[in-house]
Amino acid sequence: MRPRARLAILLPLCLLVLAAARAPAAAAPRDFTAEVRALFAVAACGEAPPSGYDAAAVAAHCKELAKSTEAWKKNWRDPAAPFFRELLQGKYPPAVVYPFGGDLSTLLVVYPDATEYTTLSLEGMGDPRPLAGLGKKLPGELTKLRQLVGPNLGWAWNTTIQLSINSSETGAGLPSILTLTLVALDINGYEPLEARFFRLGAGGAIHYLDAADLEAWDAAATARPGQRKATNAVQQGAFNDIEIVFRKRGDPSAPKKTFRHIAGDLSDAGLAKDGAALEHLAQKREIAAMTKAASYLLWKPEFTKVRDYLLGSMKHMISDDTGIPPRYSKPAGFTTDLWGTYTGPFFDWARGPVANEMIQLFRGNKRPQPFRFGYYDAAKRPILMHVHK
């Protein structure tokens, strides 16, 4: 090769190397492990609280919270865990997707052998930082927290508006939805190891929030005093989407698992405005799925995009009657197994052609459903669906 030709090739390469060297390094993600671990100890009662917190107030809170968590184990986990273990036998993909919900406590019982859990809903997780500054307000905030956690563990669902009210994006108290997630880890025998918040970028890529992102958010929050009104719209804020790495408590040899929650509108109209959530899910092409108490959204034509994603990617879906009905699942090659007796949807406003098809589907089913899972039927009886290939 002639010297001039060699120079023509090497010069652009050198310029690229110099440009890369001069480019600023990507900022490190802001690590929220300490704050989340403190919340796990103080509010979720997962371990002894660190110094600096009212030990008596925490002990009293944990004593009361234990009544709800022990009742959950006895009344739901103990009958449900062996049921799903026998049904699925661990033969499902390692990635699990749960649209229209964030109930990690149920998800870990249904799919305990998965390694990646993704939940999606309109609600965000909430800011864990206010815990450190509560001081004398801590006992009152813990009391308010139990008013959410107890019913959530003892009943089948919460409304979007109620969950939004209890997110710390609307105030400076405890982040109740995040705490529910940490309670779910504790009652299933796990502990959080790492925590980061993120937002989804182009193509559904994860962008972890760094110190500058949080400084900008805090500055903007100072400039807009007052609480955000809770609505049925997707929540806005820096503390919506979280990634928590966790593993079995006290077992360094146990495999690490990852939980991510994404706040997003999964309707076709919502995805047309911001499709990052579906673009992120599209990277998971073989999944197990779950949903419950999902307002019958997967019955509706307005949720075609997320339903088509599920039908194209899932191998299993566990649900109540708000899962994917046979009019969509059967043509895609799925079989539906049923438990319980069904006389119609729990809410009268859901009655219509799809509900009538579901009544016909359950007709003649002989398998009883031994525990509640999401919505009951119109006669307040528990039901369950397993849609699978």
Image (tube, helix red, strand yellow):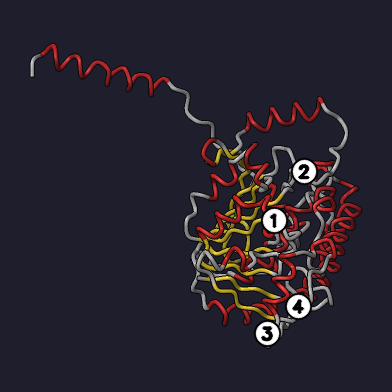
For the residues marked 4 and 2, what is the alpha-carbon distance in whole angstroms?
31 Å
The answer to whether residue 303 shows anywhere in this view is yes
Q: Secondary structure at mark 4?
A: loop
The answer to whether marks 4 and 2 mark residues whose Cβ atoms lie closer than 8 Å is: no
Residue most extreme to the left: 1
Q: What residue is rendered at 75% in x and 77% in y?
A: 342
* Image x and y of residue 241, in percent: 65, 45
Q: Residues within 10 Å of mark 4 (few under 14, many from 20)?
A: many
- Give the spatial CA distance, label 4 vs label 3: 9 Å
Mark 3 or mark 4, which is nearer the start of the sequence? 4
Determine whether the residue tagged by mark 1 lies in a helix, strand or loop: loop
Amino acid marked by disc 3:
Asn
- Residue on which disc 2 sits: 233
Amino acid type assigned to the residue bearing label 1 in the image: Lys
Q: Residues at badges 4 and 3 in contact (C-beta under 8 Å)?
A: yes
- The mark that comes first in sequence, 1 or 2, is 2
Instruction: Please give the residue where the numbered disc 3 appears in the rendered image.
Output: 365
Instruction: Give whichever of discs 3 and 2 has the lower sequence position.
Output: 2
> Pointer 1 and pointer 2: residues touching (CB < 8 Å)?
no
Q: Is residue 1 left or right of residue 11?
A: left
Image disc number at residue 300: 1
Q: Which tag is nearer the camera, tag 3 or tag 2?
A: 3
Q: Quadrant of the N terminus?
A: top left
Mark 3 surroundings within 10 Å by alpha-carbon count, few (fewer than 14), some (14 through 19), many (20 or more)? some
